[in-house]
Image (spheres, helix red, strand yellow):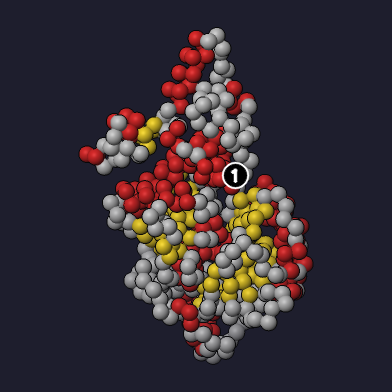
């Protein structure tokens, strides 16, 4: 991927896709404070976009929250401020909407804010997440944003609009609308994912990176010529999308074994209460105490087929043998061990050894790391197979399952590199969990733009209407 030398001097209409074809560079508008005839024409042809000035955009590193009125809201259960806000120093237009992507496990929120008491222009995109089980806390946070809308963005609370995507956009639509008393517009989940990813790939420096143990976080420069590619979105489940152009995509596969699987099984097998606790446990564990490795079978590497002795031959492959040995020892000593003891008494201390069949051999962190590897390896291999079928060399991994976790990224990256013999590349993002929310944020249509959706779709009638609107002297009417 190559650098775009003009990146820092651009303002784009995010979501513009008409006229782009495979092999062409994505069009960019010139920076200007006065609308040109070309920009007006663009607005007619692309009514579903919000104009974001990305000139000089950069990621604010660190976990300290910005000094905005939104920070008066006290964090509650399952709430997390991402700490990687995107500073937009040259965006001065009013933003009167908030976007939320509500999945099966997490609700991801994106909103724009000015910086209180700052003399600098512009503002920043903020990223916040909630556990979906605590959706009421997410709604209350949006209410707080609504109440502070004037200070945050310069617009009135009644002007706020919620752009919602994900399954929860349908499940909680009426609940959000009733609680906030504002419009809640639902957007297609997959379309939002692609719009959000395209924005991050093409416009935000130090966002996309590759990962490996020897070279962690090697950043990739933004570029325009990005198609085709594959997006592997790992949430509660996994979707794999082949993307040929802006809003030109198809879901080519997926798997039900995703983040929800890891969360569910580890909640049964260990005492971890949150997904982050589980990832922390995995970082401390030793999967070789649980998994059967190639070295356990051959005693060395299996060089003929390229497998190192540390490669996993069977996930959790040692557990049954150790369980049987422990039961035999218990019978010899006259002490029987209940088969369901472990499930009835989850481990509360991650450092505590498993109390049934392997009390001195592995712990909850060992189990966590083993299961993380099992799910990540499975996703990586399926992703590779689909990329091979569809001849795609660029594979982007997104979704809240990753969370910037080194073991997860290294496993996914290694799987793609190993199976493709280095011909394909895995890419990661610093805002991997917010693709859908950012896409929904960017899909906000200009206020009072006729009927919603009246310029979407295909067909002769639509083409004729657009052709007439672009004709000089054609009278302006409203629907």
Which percent across, then down, holds residue 213?
40, 52
137 or 191, nearer to the observer: 137
427 left or right of 193 in image? left
User: In the rendered image, is residue 281 in sight?
Assistant: yes
59 or 166, nearer to the observer: 59
**Which residue is found at the position 46% from the left and 48% from the top?**
407
Q: Image quadrant for the N terminus?
A: bottom left
**Which residue is found at the position 54% from the left and 56% from the top?**
433
The furthest residue to the front = 360
Q: Image quadrant for the C terminus?
A: bottom right
Image quadrant assignment for residue 184:
bottom right
What residue is pinned by disc 1?
A: 277
Image quadrant assignment for residue 180:
bottom right
Which percent across, then down, holds residue 42?
50, 80
322 left or right of 450 in image? left
Image quadrant assignment for residue 473:
bottom right
Above or below residue 339? Residue 379 is below
């Amino acid at each position: 991927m190559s650098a775009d030398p003009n990146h820092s001097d651009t303002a784009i209409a995010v979501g513009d896709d008409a006229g782009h074809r495979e092999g062409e560079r994505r069009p960019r508008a010139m920076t200007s404070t006065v609308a040109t005839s070309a920009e007006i024409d663009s607005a007619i042809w692309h009514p579903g976009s919000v104009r974001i000035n990305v000139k000089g955009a950069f990621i604010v590193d660190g976990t300290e929250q910005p000094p905005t009125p939104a920070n008066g809201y006290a964090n509650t259960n399952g709430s997390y401020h991402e700490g990687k806000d995107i500073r937009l120093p040259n965006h001065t237009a009013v933003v009167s909407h908030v976007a939320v992507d509500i999945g099966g496990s997490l609700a991801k929120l994106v909103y724009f804010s000015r910086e209180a008491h700052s003399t600098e222009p512009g503002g920043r995109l903020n990223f916040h997440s909630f556990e979906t089980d605590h959706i009421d806390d997410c709604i209350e946070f949006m209410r707080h944003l609504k109440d502070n809308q004037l200070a945050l963005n310069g617009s009135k609370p009644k002007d706020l609009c919620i752009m919602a995507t994900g399954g929860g956009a349908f499940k909680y639509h009426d609940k959000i609308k009733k609680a906030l008393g504002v419009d809640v517009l639902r957007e297609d989940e997959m379309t939002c994912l692609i719009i959000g990813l395209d924005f991050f790939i093409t416009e935000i420096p130090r966002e996309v990176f590759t990962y490996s143990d020897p070279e962690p976080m090697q950043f990739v420069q933004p570029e325009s010529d990005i198609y085709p590619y594959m997006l592997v979105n790992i949430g509660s489940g996994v979707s794999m999308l082949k993307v040929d152009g802006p809003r030109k995509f198809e879901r080519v596969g997926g798997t039900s074994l995703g983040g929800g699987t890891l969360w569910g099984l580890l909640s049964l097998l260990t005492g971890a209460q949150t997904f982050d606790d589980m990832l922390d446990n995995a970082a401390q564990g030793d999967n070789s105490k649980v998994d059967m490795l190639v070295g356990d079978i051959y005693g060395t590497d299996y060089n003929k087929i390229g497998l190192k002795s540390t490669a996993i031959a069977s996930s959790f492959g040692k557990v049954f043998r150790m369980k049987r040995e422990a039961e035999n020892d218990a019978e010899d000593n006259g002490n029987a061990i209940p088969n369901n003891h472990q499930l009835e008494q989850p481990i509360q201390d991650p450092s505590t050894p498993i109390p049934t069949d392997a009390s001195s051999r592995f712990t909850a962190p060992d189990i966590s790391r083993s299961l993380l590897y099992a799910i990540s390896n499975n996703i990586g291999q399926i992703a590779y197979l689909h990329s091979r079928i569809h001849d795609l060399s660029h594979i982007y991994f997104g979704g809240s399952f990753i969370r910037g976790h080194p073991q997860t990224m290294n496993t996914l990256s290694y799987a793609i590199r190993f199976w493709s013999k280095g011909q394909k590349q895995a890419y990661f993002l610093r805002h991997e969990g917010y693709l859908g929310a950012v896409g929904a944020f960017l899909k906000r249509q200009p206020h009072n733009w006729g009927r919603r959706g009246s310029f979407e779709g295909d067909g002769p009638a639509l083409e004729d209407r657009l052709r007439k609107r672009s004709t000089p002297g054609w009278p302006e009417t409203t629907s």
